[in-house]
Amino acid sequence: MTIQDLKDKDLIIYECISGSRAFGLETKSSDTDIKGVFVLPRDDYYSLEYTPQVSNESNDIVYYELGRFIELLTKSNPNILELLFTPDDCVLKTHELIHELRSLSVLTKQCQFTFGEYAMTQIRKAKGLNKKILNPILKERKTVLDFCHVLIDKEAIRLTDFLELNKITQTDCGLSKVNHMNDLYALFIGKGYSGIIRSEKSNELAMSSIPKGEVPSAFLSFNQSAYSKYCKEYKEYWDWVNDRNENRYKNNVSHGKSYDAKNMMHVFRLLNTCLEIATENRLNVRRKDRDELLAIKSGQFEYDELMVRANELHQRIKDSYSECDLIENIKRQDLENQLIKWRVEFYF
């Protein structure tokens, strides 16, 4: 099932402009995101190939099958609730069942967690970009040799320096494990050994068969944990470089505040929305705090200042939800009954 299939077969029952344009946070460079709901044809629904969601490659166009849409709604999923309450000027196509859903009690105390607590976890993600921006990792990957040191006369020197001082290569060396000593090896110099590593891509040291009575030239220590940590960070960094949005990255570098400003903007959008649900008993998709949110996106605040404000908002949210008259949870059975009713109407 593709997006074109949904359109050709007229399966879409609800379609909206979403994202920044629905929030009222669009700028000149903003894309146009589309979200909606479709109903599978009866034969497809009864077959073994249920299709819960259809999207394009970039995920800026997403359609949820009606059953999946209702399922996520029972969990107070923010994306689904925001789609349900999309401002009228962003609704491209609608169906009477959407109005029926809006009239049900779908805003509950669950929103404290799906909006508020989720937003607080995203603050760590916003700060995490700092390390990658300020501590780039060279494309040339380090090897096991860079995490080895050699003990000479009670002093440890880098293996690479040791090899250079002795005018030898790692292939001129052999290693044997020192019993009862973790990551410590006897190092021998000579021909016929296996070397310290078998190739540049090796993730472990090579052991050699050492003739009986051979005296080691030195002892070598391999920092296995540091090497493992480096490999993990190297992969994370270069995956991030390959996947990152360059315009967003340049914006984060230019404002110099060491956090992902767009992500932080959405943190506060979610926190403010969460508070309004408890205090106003409504979900305001179109943001009245546009200027403040765009100021955050442009990096006009220090991270620590935003953290203080976020914690204050978080406390207000907890207080408000403890006092508000929202129901505890969505009544799943009510929504399930509605879903069955709608299926019958569509299929029979």
Image (spheres, rainbow, N blue to C red):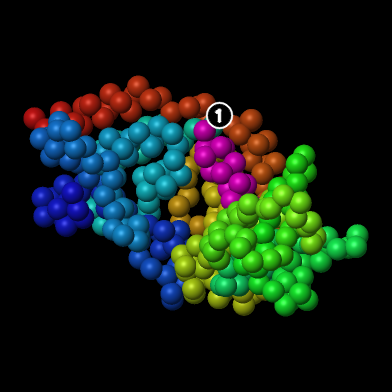
| Residue at 31 percent of width and 60 percent of height | 57
Give the overall secondary structure of the magenta segment. Answer: helix
Q: In the rendered image of this protein, does residue 15 appear above or below residue 75?
A: below
Towards the viewer: 282 or 3: 3
Residue 129 x, y percent position in the rendering: 61, 62
Provide the residue span drawn in magenta: 110-129
The answer to whether residue 327 is magenta is no
Q: Is residue 340 left or right of residue 187?
A: left
Towards the viewer: 278 or 303: 303
Quickly name the residue at label 1: 325
| Residue at 61 percent of width and 72 percent of height | 138
Q: In the rendered image of this protein, does residue 327 appear above or below residue 26?
A: above
Towards the viewer: 269 or 200: 200
Residue 9 x, y percent position in the rendering: 10, 50
Residue 125 x, y percent position in the rendering: 60, 54
Q: Is residue 126 visible?
A: no
Name the amino acid type tagged 1: Asp
Residue 324 x, y percent position in the rendering: 59, 32
The answer to whether residue 117 is magenta is yes
Kindly indicate the quadrant of the structure image that contains residue 28: bottom left
Q: Is residue 135 left or right of residue 269?
A: right
Kindly indicate the quadrant of the structure image that contains residue 7: bottom left
